[in-house]
Amino acid sequence: MSALAVTAPAFGKSAPQNMADGIEEASLFKIRPHVQLLNEDAVAIVWVTHSKSTGYVTWSQDGWKTTERAWDEEDGLLSANSTLHRAFISGIDPSKPLEYKAHSRPFKNFGPYSVSYSGAEEVCSGTMRAIAPVDAEVSWAMFNDVHENLAVYNKFMPYLSDISGFCVLNGDIVNHVDDEKDVTDRLIEPLSRIAQKTSLPVWYLRGNHETRGAFARNMRDYLALKDGHYFGAASLGGIRFVFLDCGEDKKDTSPEYSGLVNFDRYIERQNAWLEKEVASSEWKSAKARIAIRHIPAALTIPHRSGWKHGLGRLNHMDDILKNANVTLAMGAHLHNWGFHAPIPDRPYPLVVGGGPKLGEPIGKSSATLVKCHCKGGAIAVRILDETGKVVSSENVKI
Ligand SMILES: [Fe+2]
């Protein structure tokens, strides 16, 4: 279980795996682009190159009759001379597919008054589905607690064909972030793989494991975080989604953290943002309100979120959500999948995904894919095991 993960051998580093679908050694592109959802009319395209390059995107929603270009600029400087590339796109029509091309050209020399290139510009293409179709049906899916078991993605990818909205990776995707390779191979590459294979945008939400390790503080540099935060909110097809970062799962004073964390203060800062979010017209007027977080609120017992670890810092978050007319919560962390009906301390249903385990025997700690489909007046919430079998099916009224 995650509570033991700081020292448990089960959460050591996975052996390197061939992820050739996303990494092309012969190409400038080390990891092909993925689409990060930011809102129904805004996304970011993210990719990684082998060497320092330029990085911009061209995109179209009318079959390239018209072409838009997105080249991020900061303080007057266009994004360049980096192996990490992000291009933010706004003003898209979510009812139409988006075609995009990532462009990069490697530098040979980056002088103060002239630059030279070591090769021609290379292009890598991708497509994003119509994420909010005109039939008003909205669907999304959740991976969680993959814990570097990269085989999970290929196993569940075929079951995403009827999802049009997005995939959320709800934390503990990496066991601990020791170096750049942990970020690129175990997080960015899976995001790319999902985006390229399914034409879906993604939202990565941090779990408690990704706060650990020498490179955890660098991980944000590789991501297109909405407004620069690991938490955020997005609207899609009339539904409002809030993504909450629950931080570590033990007290700040726990010896494992060596006095180098302050999640108490961080969660309170996030709660101040959450209070504004649930008071906003986007939240209040939405046809459904979905709260996604790694560490879930109480299950079937009258305890708070921190019941596993005596962690009280999530009580305030629970209280805000308790009074926010939440339609459905999605959680992870427990390695014990299930659907939990509302209780007084948590007056909304909660679906929790399983753990990283693949293979027989399939049980409650096995890997799952949680799929949600909003149609008419209800959200169908299904939990699938690795064989594609629906092991839980519930309808949540909106
Ligand atoms: Fe966790």
Image (cartoon, rainbow, N blue to C red):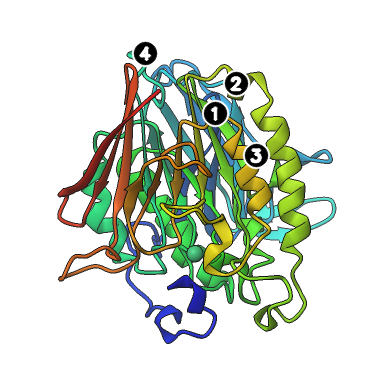
Q: Is mark 3 within 8 Å of ligand 1?
A: no
Can residue 78 be seen in this snapshot?
Answer: no
> Which numbered disc flags the more N-terminal residue, 3 or 2?
2
Disc 4, SS: loop
Left or right position of 38 against 65: right
Do the numbered discs 3 and 2 sit on residues whose CB atoms are within 8 Å? no
Front position in the image: 113 or 136: 136
For label 4, count other residues whose C-alpha is less than 10 Å away and answer few (under 14), some (14-19) or many (20+).
few
User: Looking at the image, do the residues carrying marks 3 and 4 touch, with CB atoms under 8 Å apart?
Assistant: no
Which label was assigned to residue 230?
A: none
**Mark in front: 2 vs 4:** 2
Q: Is residue 43 left or right of residue 357?
A: right
Asked which secondary structure carries label 1, the reply is loop
**What residue appears at the point 27 percent right and 37 percent down from the top-left corner?**
394
Query: Where in the figure is residue 152, as x and y percent of width and height?
Result: 29, 61
Residue 28: image location, x then y, percent: 48, 57
Which comes sooner in the sequence, label 2 or label 1?
A: 2
Q: Which residue is mark 1?
A: 325
Q: Which residue is rendered at x = 17% and y = 50% of the image?
A: 388
Q: Nearer the viewer, mark 1 or mark 4?
A: 1
Task: Please name the amino acid that badge 1 sits on.
Answer: Asn
Question: Which kind of residue does numbered mark 2 sit on?
Answer: Lys
- Say which label, 1 or 4, has the lower sequence index: 4
Q: Which residue is mark 2?
A: 284
The N terminus lies in which quarter of the figure? bottom left
The residue to which callout 3 is attached is 320
- The image shows residue 138 at horizontal and vertical percentages of 37, 25
